[in-house]
Image (cartoon, coloured by chain):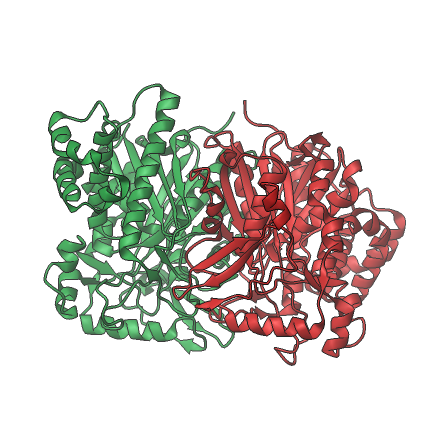
Chain colours: A green, B red
Amino acid sequence: MAPQNVGILAMEIYFPPTCIQQDILENFDGVSKGKYTIGLGQYCMAFCSEVEDVISMGLTAVTSLLEKYEIDPKQIGRMEVGSETVIDKSKSIKTFLMKIFEDCGNTDIEGVDSTNACYGGTAALFNCVNWVESSSWDGRYGLVVTTDSANLLRPGLCRGTSSTNRWSRGCCYAHGPDAPIAFESKFRASHMAHAYDFYKPDLASEYPVVDGKLSQTCYLMALDSCYKGYCQKYEKLQGNQFSMADADYFVFHSPYNKLVQKSFARLVFDDVARNASSVDESAKEKLGPFTSLNGDESYQSRDLEKASQQVAKPEYDKKVQPGTLIPKQLGNMYTASLYAAFASLIHNKSGSLDGKRVMMFSYGSGLTATMFSLRLTEGKAPFSLPNIAKILNIEHKLKTRTELEPGKFVDLMHVMEHRYGGKDYVTSKDTSHLASGTYYLTHVDSKFRRYYAKKVTESEVSNGH
Amino acid sequence: MAPQNVGILAMEIYFPPTCIQQDILENFDGVSKGKYTIGLGQYCMAFCSEVEDVISMGLTAVTSLLEKYEIDPKQIGRMEVGSETVIDKSKSIKTFLMKIFEDCGNTDIEGVDSTNACYGGTAALFNCVNWVESSSWDGRYGLVVTTDSANLLRPGLCRGTSSTNRWSRGCCYAHGPDAPIAFESKFRASHMAHAYDFYKPDLASEYPVVDGKLSQTCYLMALDSCYKGYCQKYEKLQGNQFSMADADYFVFHSPYNKLVQKSFARLVFDDVARNASSVDESAKEKLGPFTSLNGDESYQSRDLEKASQQVAKPEYDKKVQPGTLIPKQLGNMYTASLYAAFASLIHNKSGSLDGKRVMMFSYGSGLTATMFSLRLTEGKAPFSLPNIAKILNIEHKLKTRTELEPGKFVDLMHVMEHRYGGKDYVTSKDTSHLASGTYYLTHVDSKFRRYYAKKVTESEVSNGH
């Protein structure tokens, strides 16, 4: 029999323990008060120090997941990586992570890296789920790793810009049948097109070329298109209308929280525009006048943006807010963003998610986007929602972070900018901020080969761990 | 009911119409006579002129496939690209190809780029096949594009090196159920590990870091491991021994033909070492003495290499040779290499492949490798093997190429090296060598945005094409 309820069985998240408060950064950058905190809706930003990168974070997350859920590394049959951070133009990040499986001799692990901006993680996820449902599945678990440490723009380094910088982090999840987080694969809808909203054509540079205004329009346009497609597929298969009332939670790719607020409001407007039966009179009255705008006008209208966010507010607090914790506390996580947002929901609501439907919207510039939905059930330990929440341990991970002074942060960024794409250097090997079990970069040799070590505290060594 | 015999329904191959003979290049480079032709086993090398790149070749191949098999672009539900040529570190090649689907309004096409050296095409292929077998399949076709134009090393530009340069090309295929080229997905075996045999860590440079000797050992080691895994899976599921006698053809990833010869010989040796019942006495006698070598010794032994190639020769001519035409005539095609070799087999044997099993070995440095097998049936038009061979039209494509003088070739390489990763330039727009229907690069603007046009001959325009 074909495997049923294929989806996510286990999750782990790792993010660097170093961060900086956004209001302190506003002050330091000399921008107007509230620009980052209110304008972008962000509270704090995490970043890698010079001893961490996408590979070390991937090593840390995968090792931790296998240990905490007691999964035998031989039981992994596929591992996919989603990332937009290019450390090598040919060798995949996945091959670096194969180091983890060397000791047990498991080399029969399919999958490589999936790439398109922030969407790579979603592509990797779909590939993994499809594998479990395919005839090539051999009964073992699939593993998806999303890891990024891309840098947008650095105030102080890139003068004249107004964006904040964002360092990102690794997230991973194991896949198989009978999952507490199951995919409703029949309904998903994608929107893919050729666009130059955010891209990285300058190969020697760490920085992207960004058209911020275009990127936001592309995001909202793709959201509209995916939602329309999702509703059509649902209605064709289920025979009844789909509207936002049919979903309990909405999780979005979150470059910054303000865009998540706008996105949810946009969907509320979409339901008004398509005259969904669940829309109440008050919403119709407030947003109805805007339905005469053409597409482009509606993306540019500040009045519509304001009115729809106001109408959406109560539902936003209920259905979106629980999934915004980590993105607001860490910043843009690129491929990991959507899944860190989803982890926030599990963290906040793990006891009350049985039977709930979660809508997910993934976006990657260039552009690729998909809306899909998950159906949650309590599950059985170790693959149960409460246990996943316990292992994610998000509150503790957020609380034990170290806040850096802006000066120190900028110094660090300078070091890393200097080293970008470089070779022949030794890192500080300063692991004082890292928790035991964290991997870190020790050096890069004259042939660009990278070397990592794992921090192990003395007490663990003496305990035989 | 689940879709049966999922596999490749249609294939098209495009390669640049400009090439240079390897013996002329030997002379021009001042290397010993036979270095490229006998030492590497290569006859000719194709390369892109300055108006072609991985995107233009992808546009050409996909458009041609849709037209020639009369597939409605709306009937494509997934498109995956395998490539190791990085034109943008964030935006996928797949998004460029979405231009083809703009006119018909089909934006609901899943898939992004899969990346790990020459293996990306195989990963994309598996993803596409798994999708057709998964619950998320919506009945439409999947499309896989493998496209590369990577440059290894240029004699004359990189003095002191001995390798030839290799420019590569695009290949694409459509997927669905009831295919004449079906996957035997249960048997496939992979070998994935962390290695630094060939990689591209210098982001600003077009050139890889290569350890040629290590890369060959990694290739052969991965081949051994995959063959062992394949045999084990086959034997577990089928209950009887698998050996090379159970397969009709062998197709290999072909960086150069000599490695293909070595690889097939290695498998012959593997069958002797595992005492397969199909091995004849003469082979046992000649290769038996080498089975006492340990792994590393056996990879380095020139005597074993020679003896096994000698023993393998008659079977090589029968089972491998038919799949070597294009790789020998074009050079290393990276992600397209294995599939261009497979296309050669279809071209050479299309009338007699019904019921045959083809073993495929895919390798990407870094490293990732898989051995899998295909079961062929005649099929029904337009998705039949004879029709695929007709559309591939390989003989004509090879015959109508233009041979360039070495001096012109080197000049061209200089122009392209200079432009690597660059912006703000206009190409010559010289399409004199290109066939009608070929896409070409016209210019790259100051924001690195790339523009393409399609060559259409006047007679076609007046005919309304």
Is B293 situated above or below A247? below
Residue B322: x and y, percent?
Answer: 78, 48
Determine if residue A31 is in view: yes
Left or right, B145 with respect to A280, comes to: right
Residue B248: x and y, percent?
Answer: 77, 41
Residue B152: x and y, percent?
Answer: 61, 68
Decide which of B230, A235 is in the foreground and name it: A235
Residue A402: x and y, percent?
Answer: 21, 64
Determine if residue A381 is in view: no
The residue under the point 51% across, 45% down is B80
Total marks placed:
0
* Residue at the farthest front position: B462
Decide which of B445, B321 is in the foreground and name it: B445
Left or right, B454 with respect to B164, comes to: left
Is A318 situated above or below A37? above
In which quadrant is the C terminus of chain A drawn?
Answer: bottom left
Left or right, A70 with respect to B158, comes to: left
* Residue at the farthest right position: B282
Is A151 situated above or below A332? below
Decide which of A98, A462 is in the foreground and name it: A98
The residue under the point 63% across, 64% down is B215
